[in-house]
């Protein structure tokens, strides 16, 4: 607890009768209970199942270590998130764990955190444009994109020279730092097939800025897919859709269904996704969505809790990044976990086998 430690150093031994530091960094109050401080957790939205799981898991991990927690959700509104974080700072939290809604909207709030000596962990989404972010915990985000592309390459038999096939490209929210990493990872592997014309984007929309989906919103993706189908696929079928996230895949699927896809004569295209959200895993089992990228959020939450605990105990958190993530102002030390591609062939072993879901969840 940085603030408390600082106060302790100033008043020194005179306080030691009332408060003594425990061996592992907490403070023992007169009543004998260990007080490790409070951690503020700012999550982006409750509208997506994954962030509910993240919030719950981070809280459980921190409480297991003896911390109090304040969990808030910004409901995808950047201004709400800014005021929530400012409030947590005023309440005197000892550390902040933040999954940003808009990665550049938090600079003012994080300056206040720095002024109050509150360390900040950027959770899953890197906060950009500020030096006031201490650590980053996420997954290998380029690998997420590569796994989505590999699934498309394998399903269409592109390595065997098959094609040409039609494909449409979707990307995530333009204000999320991950969006570019997912897209770059995927395009690194898909671009050679676009160049050889084994893959053809009939809409012509290939530049990242033309294919983003604000706030990862499914209905926004549906509208864009509706337009693409109406304008570019009147006589042709779309064979594959690169989708970066399950919620976007659901929007794309509903546009496809409205256009008659999903029948023997007009099968669904290959559609990727991310997060292994329950509704989408069911769609994979049903043969509608083809793939998702599973990221074990229990590990992400555990790692964030380890980091917070280490920082507050003056330990350097364990890091494993081969190259630190640059946020425009500094290279943020990071711990990156590994994502796993999931489709109909391995969902049972990966998702049920690891206890992420039960067989009953997927019924
Ligand atoms: C990204 C995250 C993805 C997905 C998406 C939409 O930042 O890395 O896993 O959850 O947001 O919520």
Image (cartoon, rainbow, N blue to C red):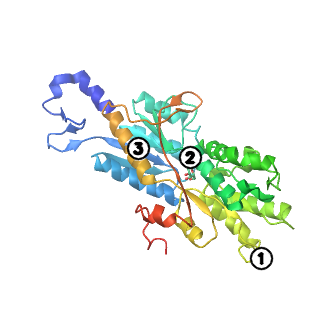
* Label 1, label 3: how far apart the Cα atoms are: 48 Å
- The reply to whether discs 2 and 3 touch (Cβ–Cβ < 8 Å) is no
Q: Earlier in the sequence, mark 2 or mark 3?
A: 2
> Which element type, helix, strand or loop, lies under badge 2?
loop
Q: Is residue 123 visible?
A: no
Distance Cα–Cα, label 1 vs label 2: 41 Å
Q: Which residue is mark 1?
A: 265
Helix or strand or loop: what does disc 3 sit on? helix
Say whether marks 1 and 3 touch (CB < 8 Å).
no
Going from N to C along the chain, the mark reached first, 1 or 2, is: 2
Q: Position of residue 340 (x, y in %)?
A: 52, 54
C-alpha separation, residue under disc 2 versus residue under disc 3: 18 Å
Numbered disc in front, either 1 or 3: 1
Give 311 or 267, whichever is nearer the viewer.
267
Q: Which residue is mark 2?
A: 101
Q: Residue extending furthest left? A: 17
Mark 3, residue position: 304
Frontmost of labels 1 and 2 is 1
x then y, percent, for residue 72: 45, 50
């Amino acid at each position: 607890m940085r603030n408390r430690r600082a106060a302790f150093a100033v008043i020194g031994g005179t306080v030691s009768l009332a408060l003594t530091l425990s061996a592992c960094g907490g403070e023992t109050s007169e009543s004998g209970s260990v007080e490790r401080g409070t951690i503020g957790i700012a999550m982006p939205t409750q509208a997506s199942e994954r962030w509910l799981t993240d919030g719950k898991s981070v809280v459980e991990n921190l409480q297991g270590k003896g911390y109090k927690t304040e969990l808030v959700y910004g409901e995808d509104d950047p201004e709400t998130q800014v005021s929530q974080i400012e409030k947590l700072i005023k309440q005197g939290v000892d550390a902040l764990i933040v999954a940003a809604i808009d990665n550049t909207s938090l600079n003012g709030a994080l300056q206040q955190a720095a002024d109050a000596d509150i360390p900040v962990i950027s959770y899953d989404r890197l906060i950009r444009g500020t030096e006031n972010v201490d650590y980053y915990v996420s997954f290998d985000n380029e690998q997420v994109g590569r796994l989505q592309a590999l699934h498309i390459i394998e399903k269409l038999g592109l390595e065997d020279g098959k094609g040409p096939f039609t494909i449409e490209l979707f990307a995530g929210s333009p204000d999320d730092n991950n969006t570019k990493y997912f897209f770059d990872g995927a395009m690194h592997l898909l671009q050679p097939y676009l160049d050889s014309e084994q893959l053809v984007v009939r809409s012509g929309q290939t530049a990242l800025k033309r294919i983003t989906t604000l706030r990862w919103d499914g209905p926004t993706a549906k509208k864009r897919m509706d337009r693409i189908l109406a304008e570019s696929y009147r006589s042709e079928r779309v064979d594959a859709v690169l989708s970066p996230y399950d919620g976007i895949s659901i929007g794309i699927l509903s546009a496809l269904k409205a256009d008659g896809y999903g029948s023997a004569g007009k099968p669904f295209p290959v559609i990727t996704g991310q997060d292994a959200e329950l509704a989408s895993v069911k769609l994979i089992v049903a043969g509608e969505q083809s793939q998702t990228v599973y990221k074990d959020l229990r590990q992400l939450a555990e790692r964030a809790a380890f980091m917070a605990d280490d920082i507050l105990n003056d330990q350097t958190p364990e890091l494993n990044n081969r190259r630190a993530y640059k946020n425009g102002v500094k290279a943020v030390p990071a711990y990156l976990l590994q994502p796993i591609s999931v489709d109909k062939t391995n969902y049972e072993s990966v998702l049920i086998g690891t206890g992420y879901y039960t067989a009953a969840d997927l019924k």
